[in-house]
Amino acid sequence: MTIVYGAPGAYPTELDDFYVHTVTVHTLTSQGAWGDDYTPTAGVKCFIDDTRTLVRDGQGAEVISETNLTAPPYYASLFKPGSTVDLPSRTATVIKAGLADSGPLELPDHIEVWLT
């Protein structure tokens, strides 16, 4: 298991004070006839919002998301659809994730992850 408290070359962001939760992400690495393979990463700092929301998954179907997670952008590659996240109260599956990149506006960049 990898323990990540900041990715290599990670930089501080204006939102770091709000990342008060820590989760473990089991990134879906492959799917096969003998089951799925995951790579766990512990110590992912984030903010958890347990608000039920109707979202669209990668195929366009409407799905209920029970939790929205916000994290620093250097964790974006961990949250592939189908990956699982160990929350403080339960384990959830990634529906979709998106990067909020402000470009030249110099606003705080972050990722948003919608979980089952």
Image (spheres, rainbow, N blue to C red):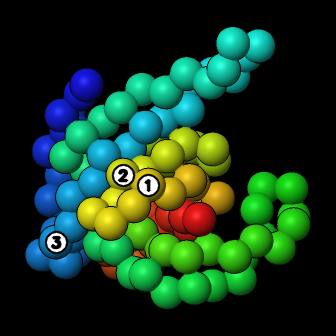
Q: Nearer the viewer, mark 2 or mark 3?
A: 2
Using the rendered image of the protein, determine whether residue 72 is visible from the camera's viewpoint.
Answer: no
Q: Who's the residue at 87% across and 64% down the image?
A: 60
Residue type at mark 1: give it.
Thr
How many C-alpha atoms fall within 10 Å of the one at disc 2: few (<14), some, or many (≥20)? Answer: some
Q: Who's the residue at 36% across and 32% down the image?
A: 40
The residue that disc 2 covers is 86
The residue that disc 1 covers is 91
Q: Who's the residue at 56% across and 53% down the image?
A: 93
Q: Earlier in the sequence, mark 2 or mark 3?
A: 3
71 or 94, which lies in front? 94
Which element is circle 3 on?
A: loop
Residue type at mark 3: give it.
Val
Looking at the image, residue 40 lies above or below residue 48 = above
Image quadrant occupied by the C terminus: bottom right
Q: Who's the residue at 18% across and 34% down the image?
A: 3
Which element is circle 1 on?
A: strand
Which label number is shown at residue 20?
3
Residue 51: image location, x then y, percent = 49, 87
Residue 7: image location, x then y, percent = 23, 39
Q: Earlier in the sequence, mark 2 or mark 1?
A: 2
Residue type at mark 2: give it.
Asp
Looking at the image, residue 104 lies above or below residue 51 = above
Tag 2 near tag 3, CB within 8 Å:
no
